[in-house]
Amino acid sequence: MKNHECRRNFYTLFLLVTTIVFALSIGACTTPEKSKAQHVARGQALLKDKKFQDAALEFRSALQIDERMADAHWGLAQAYEGMQHFQQAFDEMKQTVDLDANNLDARVKLGNYFVANARQSSSAVSEAERLAQQILQKDPNHIEGHILMGSVFFAQGKKTEALQELNHAVELNPQRIESYLSLARFYASTNDKDTADATYKRAIAANNNSALAHYEFGKYLVQTNRAETAEGEFQTAVSVEPNNRDARFVLASFYPVNKR
């Protein structure tokens, strides 16, 4: 009886020790470098699914391990922007730019924030110009860098130079919808309605299956009091990309605003 009890106690102790050793070996395999990379990878996947709050938690967890991790700051900036927490997004973008000289996308986004704040800050346009110059020094063919520089010139009242930058952005990739949209907004801002219309249609001609091209043209049509025509563009946006959440949101928002 005593031998049986001893064997049972020994077996229990053996299982306990084995479990502890296994747990310690797993913990030893998860280094801080690996752990923070896993948090960032999960955060980036959540960003794609537009689960911004969950993504923010992952990026914050990475930053608790390494507060100078540029990728985590950039991811957190995008998550904050998705949640419309724009001041926090702006702060995280500045952190990203300070930590990573090669993140040109962060510089573009931060520069656009500065341009948007030009009326409230006399130095904002200068900051945007500095960022645009940094981008184009590193990559002279960076499309968004040229578009940012165009925005800077426009804010400085240099419309001819702004138009040159925007046209150059289109020339760099004639299939890129976003470049046409930036050019169309330029013409809309200068009250050149006919050319704005034509440029939005150039975007659609570049890719008729782009929901973005259709619903952005629809937004412009609403702004210029052509709601009937806009509705057709919003519906087309949804039909060409049924899973595009932004297209569906724009169409859904259009109806109550126009009492339909």
Image: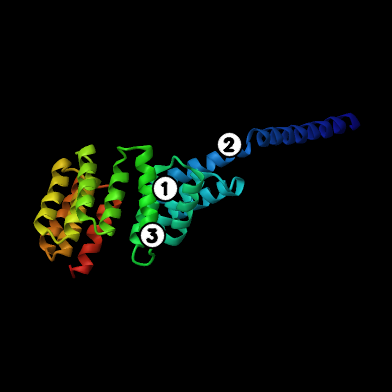
Q: Earlier in the sequence, mark 2 or mark 3?
A: 2
Task: Give the quarter of the image for residue 133.
Answer: top left
Vertical arrangement, residue 120 with respect to residue 194, above or below = below
x then y, percent, for residue 240 = 19, 45
Residue for badge 1: 47
Q: How far apart are marks 2 and 3 (CA)?
A: 38 Å
Amino acid on which disc 3 is placed = Ala
Label 3 belongs to which residue? 124
On the image, which quarter does residue 80 sit in? bottom left
Find disc 2 in the rendering and name its residue.
34
- CB contact under 8 Å: marks 2 and 1: no
Distance of label 3 from label 1 (alpha carbons): 28 Å
Residue drawn at x 35%, y 54% as measured from the top left = 112
In this picture the colour scheme is rainbow
Labelled pair 2, 3 in contact (Cβ < 8 Å): no
Three-letter amino acid code at the position of disc 1: Leu
Alpha-carbon span between mark 2 and mark 1: 20 Å
